[in-house]
């Protein structure tokens, strides 16, 4: 690692600090060269929660990202961003925790955009707490939209010139979404020719870099049975199929639209055998994320496509009901760190 990887604290009232502490404890080789962007007191408290009477892992305060590369083994480096007036209660919605979580993302994203860190791994934040934290974070429904805005500002582009998409991936399935955090009614309206074609292009470009070859993309329909020839809706005929045809004309390997209730099974890799598709394009948030999460939240990774930086995260939320117990599973965060390292390595090769 020539540059460190930044891991944001997430919501201090959620499981973010605990799973970070577990990742550093249980995967020391993987987290070597990583550091936490967050609050020292919250991180030290989380280390105590998971120690269960054993000697707690030391949390060392660093002043800049580069120091993380020279930390001794079994030490958890942390760069303090902002502060909490007092420790937040685990499992309780907190405006202070929301504001701090947003501040950590902003700092880490700007460091990545400046080239000071190799990648950004974000622990879960709570969208309601983020909104309670006030401006400027209240303007964003989540990480993806915040990172898009920061990247656009940094590069002098408008939001429309910085299109991003969410990909959720585990060992069996990859899914990219046309729309992200919007109502179902708005998500249906977002299924336009331009949106579908743009998503196909972003998916092709990003997966080509990740896989080292052009990906095979399967496209889910919007309606049951992909519209059944227009009986259950005409979006497949009038919007999705024309966008697929346009993508094929540009050289993309795209098939569909397929019935949403079967396309994910066709793409699933099983018993060491690859699926029919490398990735499925889903028309809206829950259509795509339910099948991936059903296959295993503990191994899922969220990757933001289209950004001029590497960003991954676990595919679960803040789990307020488990916060403070030391029982949260860090497997998805560990998978996100591993994915970030792989993406950085591939970017360096290319």
Image: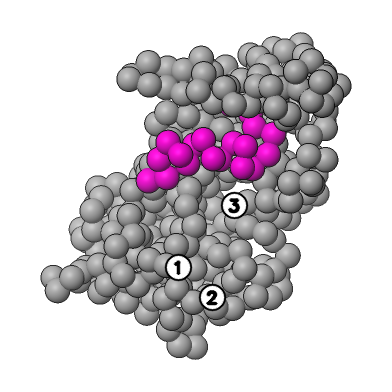
- Determine whether 242 is above or below 338 in the image: above
| Residue closest to the eye, 180 or 29 | 180
| Residue closest to the eye, 214 or 154 | 214
**Does dot 3 land on a helix, a strand or a loop?**
helix
Q: Position of residue 147 (x, y in %)?
A: 63, 54
Mark closest to the chain's N terminus, 2 or 1? 2
Which stretch appears magenta? 278-298
Residue beneath disc 2: 93
Position of residue 12 in the picture relative to residue 308 (left or right): left
Which residue is most to the left?
54
Position of residue 180 in the picture relative to residue 318 (left or right): right
Residue beneath disc 3: 113
Residue 269: in magenta span = no
Do tag 2 and tag 3 residues touch (Cβ < 8 Å)? Answer: no
The coloring applied to the image is one colour
CA distance separating discs 2 and 1: 8 Å
Q: Is residue 305 visible?
A: no
| Residue closest to the eye, 235 or 252 | 235
CA distance separating discs 1 and 3: 31 Å
Nearer the camera: disc 2 or disc 3: 2
Mark closest to the chain's N terminus, 2 or 3? 2
Do tag 1 and tag 3 residues touch (Cβ < 8 Å)? Answer: no
């Amino acid at each position: 690692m020539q540059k460190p990887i930044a891991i944001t604290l997430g919501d201090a009232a959620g499981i973010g600090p605990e799973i970070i502490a577990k990742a550093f404890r249980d995967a020391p080789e993987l987290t070597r060269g990583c550091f936490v962007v967050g609050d020292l007191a919250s991180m030290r408290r989380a280390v105590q929660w998971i120690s269960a009477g054993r000697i707690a892992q030391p949390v060392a305060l660093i002043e800049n990202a580069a120091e993380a590369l020279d930390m001794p083994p079994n030490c958890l480096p942390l760069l303090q961003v902002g502060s909490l007036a007092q420790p937040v209660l685990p499992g309780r919605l907190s405006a202070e925790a929301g504001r701090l979580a947003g501040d950590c993302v902003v700092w880490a994203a700007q460091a990545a955009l400046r080239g000071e860190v190799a990648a950004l791994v974000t622990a879960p934040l709570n969208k309601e707490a983020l909104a309670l934290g006030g401006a400027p974070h209240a303007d964003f429904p989540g990480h993806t939209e915040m990172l898009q805005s920061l990247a656009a500002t940094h590069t002098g582009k408008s939001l429309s010139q910085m299109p991003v998409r969410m990909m959720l991936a585990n060992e069996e399935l990859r899914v990219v979404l046309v729309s992200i955090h919007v109502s179902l009614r708005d998500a249906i309206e977002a299924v336009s020719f331009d949106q579908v074609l743009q998503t196909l292009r972003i998916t092709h470009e990003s997966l080509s870099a990740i896989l080292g070859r052009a990906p095979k993309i399967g496209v889910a329909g919007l309606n049951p049975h992909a519209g059944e020839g227009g009986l259950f809706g005409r979006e497949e005929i009038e919007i999705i199929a024309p966008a697929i045809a346009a993508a094929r004309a540009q050289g993309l390997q795209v098939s569909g639209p397929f019935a949403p209730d079967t396309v994910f099974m066709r793409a699933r890799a099983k018993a060491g055998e690859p699926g029919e598709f490398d990735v499925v394009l889903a028309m809206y948030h829950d259509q795509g994320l339910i099948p991936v999460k059903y296959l295993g939240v503990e191994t899922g990774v969220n990757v933001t496509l289209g950004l001029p930086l590497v960003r991954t995260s676990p595919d679960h939320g803040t789990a307020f009901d488990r916060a403070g117990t030391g029982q949260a599973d860090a497997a998805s965060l560990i998978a996100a760190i591993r994915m970030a390292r792989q993406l950085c390595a591939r970017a360096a090769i290319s």
